[in-house]
Image (spheres, grey):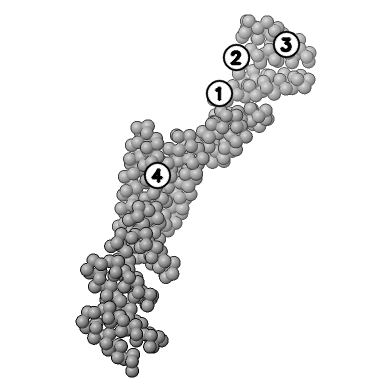
């Protein structure tokens, strides 16, 4: 009987818009019948009405307290939570808003609307990359979601503006400024392969080779996913031709970066590291003679004569008329001949010196070395002819 009286009293207060008194009466009723769900539901609704009245008066903090109590009594009612979110937004407490929406996404079924809502909050907090990822999730769930599509369009426009600014800075030689702009572009669209391609090229020009390789590898991976028709990649609107163009250019730049990094290591006498980098470059591009020349030079510095010879010969097969390769082949054969001579393998030494002369006949030292080898065989006539050739090429030579 007492419960009914409290309920009647509460409803009378409610008619007078005395929400606080109505709340007190319903709370008494709930204490008397704690298992009565209808009483708790009605109390939650009164808290909601009280909160709405306070919200309309601009009393957002008090309204938030009322909506929070309503949501506590009936947590399944999303509208109560949404009103709390409205209060937090009006108070400028976007971090609390973000935490609330994230809790919903973790606790409830994930929807495009919730991802879009959180994306807006990320954007408000200038967390652009997180905004992008939430919009991507929203569009995967609902590709035709207009709000998510519109906001994604804004991010893509901002990203493209930043990319164009980066290009202008790079053309002006302002590489550090260009890097800053392309970073901005990537914050707005962090899964765009051509942005990573561009940044990789910038890093290469700045000699930040490790960062360049990471970006170029990522550009290849993203473009491969796009070319394969990955659902997330299709959201960007690029065609398969676009993806393949990015992939091809990224692979070219990756080879150039491996090579540049190897040259950088070579200049600091890090020959083993340079070989490893050139191995990666050759794995990507097997028909570039310059890569074999550079790796051969590394082997040469490490006294790996046979490996050096093999690389120079491979380079010659690719570019048979390249005089730089012929000079290196002459040097390596002369080196091998010298070692044969020191091991008293005079015929092998003479053959190696002959190869050196064949590749570069204008070097007097090669004839001089062969003359010494011939004299040990003995091949007096051959030694004599080589001594004459040495003097013709180098009249100042007094070794013969």
Which residue is disc 3 drawn over?
A: 383
Quick one: 180 or 305, which is closer to the camera?
Answer: 180
Which residue is disc 1 drawn over?
A: 324
Q: Quadrant of the N terminus?
A: bottom left
Mark 2 to mark 4 CA distance (whole Å): 54 Å
Q: Residue 168's x, y, as percent?
A: 33, 37
Q: Residue 226's x, y, as percent?
A: 43, 52
Q: Is residue 208 left or right of residue 20?
A: right
Mark 3 to mark 4 CA distance (whole Å): 68 Å
Q: Is residue 18 left or right of residue 365?
A: left
Q: Secondary structure at mark 4?
A: helix
- Residue 79 in view: no
Circles 3 and 1, Cβ within 8 Å, touching? The answer is: no
- Residue 49 in view: yes
Mark 4 to mark 1 CA distance (whole Å): 41 Å
Quick one: 329 or 203, which is closer to the camera?
Answer: 203
Q: Which mark is residue 362?
A: 2
Mark 1 to mark 2 CA distance (whole Å): 14 Å
Mark 3 to mark 1 CA distance (whole Å): 29 Å
**Disc nearer the start of the sequence (3/4):** 4
Quick one: 36 or 33, which is closer to the camera?
Answer: 33
Q: Secondary structure at mark 1?
A: helix
**Disc nearer the start of the sequence (1/2):** 1
Give the residue displayed 37% in from the left and 32% down from the top.
Answer: 173
Circles 3 and 4, Cβ within 8 Å, touching? The answer is: no
Which residue is disc 4 drawn over?
A: 183
Quick one: 213 or 342, which is closer to the camera?
Answer: 213
Q: Residue 325's x, y, as percent?
A: 57, 25
């Amino acid at each position: 009987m007492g419960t009914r009286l409290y309920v009647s009293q509460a409803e009378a207060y409610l008619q007078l818009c005395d929400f606080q008194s109505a709340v007190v009466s319903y709370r008494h009723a709930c204490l008397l019948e704690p298992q009565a769900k209808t009483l708790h539901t009605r109390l939650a609704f009164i808290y909601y009405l009280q909160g709405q009245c306070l919200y309309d008066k601009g009393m957002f903090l008090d309204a938030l307290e009322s909506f929070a109590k309503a949501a506590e009594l009936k947590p399944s009612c999303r509208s109560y939570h949404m009103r709390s979110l409205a209060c937090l937004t009006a108070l400028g407490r976007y971090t609390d808003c973000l935490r609330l929406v994230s809790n919903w996404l973790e606790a409830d079924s994930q929807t495009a609307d919730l991802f879009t809502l959180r994306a807006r909050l990320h954007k408000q907090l200038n967390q652009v990359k997180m905004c992008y990822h939430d919009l991507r999730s929203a569009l995967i769930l609902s590709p035709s979601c207009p709000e998510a599509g519109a906001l994604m369009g804004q991010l893509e426009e901002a990203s493209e503006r930043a990319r164009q600014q980066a290009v202008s800075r790079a053309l002006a030689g302002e590489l550090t400024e260009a890097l800053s702009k392309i970073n901005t572009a990537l914050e707005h669209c962090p899964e765009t392969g051509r942005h990573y391609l561009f940044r990789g090229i910038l890093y290469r020009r700045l000699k930040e080779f490790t960062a360049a390789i990471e970006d170029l590898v990522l550009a290849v991976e993203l473009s491969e996913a796009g070319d394969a028709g990955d659902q997330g990649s299709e959201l960007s609107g690029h065609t398969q031709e676009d993806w393949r163009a990015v992939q091809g250019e990224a692979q070219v730049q990756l080879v150039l970066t491996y090579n540049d990094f190897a040259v950088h290591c070579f200049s600091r006498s890090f020959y083993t590291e340079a070989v490893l980098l050139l191995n990666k470059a050759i794995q990507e591009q097997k028909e570039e003679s310059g890569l074999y020349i550079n790796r051969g030079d590394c082997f040469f510095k490490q006294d790996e004569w046979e490996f050096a010879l093999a690389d120079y010969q491979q380079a010659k097969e690719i570019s048979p008329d390249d005089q730089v390769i012929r000079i290196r082949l002459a040097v390596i054969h002369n080196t091998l001949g010298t070692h044969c001579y020191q091991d008293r393998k005079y015929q092998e030494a003479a053959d190696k010196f002959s190869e050196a002369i064949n590749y570069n006949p204008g070097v007097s030292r090669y004839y001089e070395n062969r003359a010494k080898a011939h004299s040990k065989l003995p091949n007096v006539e051959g030694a004599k002819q080589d001594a004459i050739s040495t003097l013709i090429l180098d009249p100042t030579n007094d070794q013969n």
